[in-house]
Amino acid sequence: MSLTRRTLLAASGAGAVALGGAACGSGGAMDPSVPLDIDVADADLSGAIGLLTPDFVGDDRAVLDDDIIAPFTKRTGVDVSVDQVDWNKLNEKISTGIAGGIIADVIMTGVGWTQPFAEKGIFAEIPADFIEGLGYDESVLVSTRYDGRYYSLPQALDLRFIGFHPELLEKKGIDSAPESLDELAQAAAELTGDGVVGLDFLSGSAGSARQAFVFLLYAFGGTMFSDDGLAPRLHEEPGRLALQWMLDCMDTGAIDYSIQAAEGQPSPFQQKKAAMSLVSTGNWPTWQTMTPELCEKGAVGTFLLPSGVDADPVMFQGGTFISISSLSKNKDAAAGFMKHMLEPDILGKASAATGKVPPTPDIPETEGIRSNLLMAFGLENLPYAGATEGGSAAYMEVRSNLDGIVETCLTGRATVDQTLADMKKLCDGAISRI
Amino acid sequence: MTTDHAPSISGTAPSATRARDHSLRRRKRTSNALVLAFLIAASVIMAAPFLWMAISSIRDPTELAQVPMPLIPKDLRLENYSEALGRAPFATYARNSLILATAAAALNVVFASACGYALAKLRFRLAPAVFGWMVACIMIPFYATVIPVFLMVRHMPLFGGNTLMGVGGTGWIDTWWALIVPGAVSPFMVFLFRQFYVSTPSELIEAARLDGVSEFGIYTRIITPLIRPGLLTVALLSFEAGWNNFLWPLLVTTSDSLRVIQVGIASFRQEASTDWHLLMAGTTLAAVPMIVLFLIFQRYFVQGFAASGIK
C-alpha cells in the first residue's frame, strides 16, 4: 500500500486517539455516555458551543452568522463560535481534535463519514423518534446510521446526475433520455466527434474517479459494503461491470480520460466540449459566474443515471451532515442548535446561501431555490438519491486510497480483475484495523 | 610608409587572422544568442504560472470558461481585487501571516544558527550522532508528526487552564504560542547553518580564544558575521515557510482572529465550485510580499545556497 499523507495522519491519529481519550478522561469534565436530550426547552439552554463546518465560506459566512446563528443566540442565549475548515482538511482537523480531546460540540461532515466517527464513539446517538418525526426520505437517512442507530442528520445535499446540451443531442437525432446504461453508452458514442466528447464522466467538477465508480456501482445494483459494514462488496460483479462500462466507453471515445477537468476548473461540459456530463447541484454557482448562459431555462437538460440491471435510475448523493460530539460539555445546547439548523426556514436560508440542496422539499421557497434548476431537479428526484459512498466504519481509510486504484484501472496500468482484487485488499485491510 | 604588423605566431597571414577572429566572434555571438534564447525560454516557462495567475486575476470570470481563452484579457476587471478582499478579513489574515512569518524567520535565525554553530565548531563526542539525528529529522514528513506535536501543544502544562499535568484546559490551542513555537527551530535550518559554519576558518576561533573572547562572543561577534548570506537565506526560507503555512494554523486555531492568509485564500474554493477570478486575485496579493523579498535579497540568497553547497 502506498504511504500517503492521509495514511500517515490516519496511522498517527489512530495511535493518538487512545492517548487523547485518556487525557480527556483524566480531565473529568466530559462524559461521552451522557445521552442526547433533544427536547430541552430553549429557556433551559445556556453557555457556549463550538461549530465545526466546512460550508458557509466567503460571502456565505455572513448568512451563517447573521441569519442562522444570531436568531438561535437571541432565542436561547447560547453563544456559538464557528471554526471553519476547508473540506480537504476537515478529516485532519477532526482527527487532531479527537486526539487532543477538544473537538467542537456540533460537527458538520460528509456522506460516508458518519460510520467511522460513530464507531470511534465520537458522535453522539440521535434519538430515532426525533429523526423519524422529521419526515425525511429514507434515501437521505441511509448514511446517517451506524449499527442500526442514528448519528447524524443531513443538513444540505450535493446531488449528481447527468446533464446534457439539448441542441447537441437534437443534432444527432437523440430526442429522449437513455433508459439503460447500454443506451447511454451508445448515445455517448454517437455524440462523440467534431471536437466534442459524448460523455464527460470523470471531471472533478462533479466528483472524482472514485465517485464515478461508486455511482456506476449502484447503477449496476451493487453496494460498497455489506449491511454491517464488515465485508467489502464493491469488488463483486456490479463492480466489475462498472469498471468495464467505463473502459468500454473509453475504447469507443465516448469517454475521454484526457479531457477531464480538475476540481473547480471550467469543465468540458461548460465549454461545450462534452455533450453530456456528470453534473452536481453544487456546480450551479460556478455556472452562474462563469457560464451564465447555462443557467437559462432549457439551456441544459438533465436525467438520472439509468440502471444497468433494469432497475430504477439512480442519483449520487453527497452533502453535509450534522452531528453532535459525544465529548461535548454542553450537549443540550448542541442538540438545540442542531434542531435549529434543521428548521425549514433555516434550511431554506442555508440552501439559498450555499447553493446546496436541502434534505427535504418541505421548505419555504426562496428566489435562490426557485431559480436553481439543478436544485429543482435534485429535489424532485430525492427518492432516487441512493448512490452513496461509505457504509463501513473503515471507510475513511478506504476513501483516500480508492481514487488511485480506480485511476490505475482507467489508465490501463491494471486489469479489471487486478483492480477489483486491489479494492478488496484495501477494504479488508482497513476493516481489519477497526 | 610602412606599417608594422605583429608577426603571427603561427605564421598565418593577417587577413587570415582577421577572418579567424571574425569567425570566432561570430561563433561567440551565436553561442551567446543561443544561451540567451535558452535562458529567456526557461525564464518564460518558469514565470508562466505567475504571469497566468496575475493575468487571470484581472479577467472577467466568463472569459475563464471561453474556448479558446484569449491570452490578454479583453476587459481589465480590477474589481476582482476589491471583491476578493471583501470576502474575508484579509487585513487580519495578512497581519497574522506577517507576525507568524517574521517570528519564524527571527527564531530560526537565532536558535538554528546556535545549533548549527555548535554542531560545526564545538567539539563534543555526540556531535556526529546529534547531526545525524538532525538530518534524519528532515526526512520525517510533517504529517507523521502533526498529531504528536498537536498533543504537546494541547497538553502544555499551566497554559489555557491546564494543570501541571497538562490536563483540564486547552493548553496552547488557539493561541499565538501554538502558531509560533512549534516552528521556531527547523532541523533543515540547523543543517543549513551547520554547512555555512563548516566553511568558516577555525583559526579565527582559536585566535579569538587566545585573545580571551568568550565562546558566546566568538559565535556572535567573530563567526556569525562571516555567514551573512546564510543568515539571509535561512531568514528568507523561514519567512516563506511561515507565510505559506496553511495546515498547522488551521489545526491549532479555531477563531478567525488567529487565522492566516492561506486560510483566507482557501475560502474561494468550495466543495464543488471555485471562484477562479477571486482565487487568482487573492493568490496574487498573497504572493506579492514573497516576490518583493526575493527580488531585494536574491543576490544573498543565491550566494547563500552556493556557499552551503546546496544547489
Image: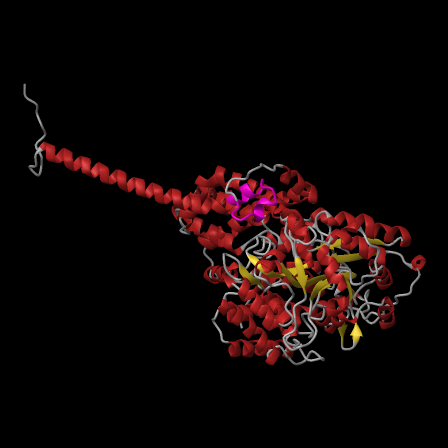
Image height of A183 relative to B131, above or below: below
Furthest-front residue in this view = A173
Occupied quadrant, residue A25: bottom right
**x and y, in percent, of residue B97 in the image:** 63, 45
Image height of A237 relative to A324, above or below: below
Q: Is residue B79 visible?
A: yes
**x and y, in percent, of residue B77 in the image:** 61, 38
Which residue: 76% across, 70% down? A139
Q: Nearer the viewer, residue B59 or A100?
A: B59
Image height of A121 relative to B250, above or below: below
- Number of numbered callouts drawn: 0
Q: Specify whether B232 is left or right of A48.
A: left
Image height of B60 relative to A323, above or below: above
Occupied quadrant, residue A27: bottom right
Task: Give the residues drawn in magenta, as a range.
Answer: B52-69
Occupied quadrant, residue A324: bottom right
**x and y, in percent, of residue A309 in the image:** 64, 78
Q: Specify whether B99 is left or right of A134.
A: left
**x and y, in percent, of residue A83 in the image:** 73, 54
Which residue: 61% across, 70% down? A11
Q: Is residue A86 visible?
A: no
Q: Nearer the viewer, residue B171 or B212?
A: B171
Residue B55 belongs to magenta span: yes
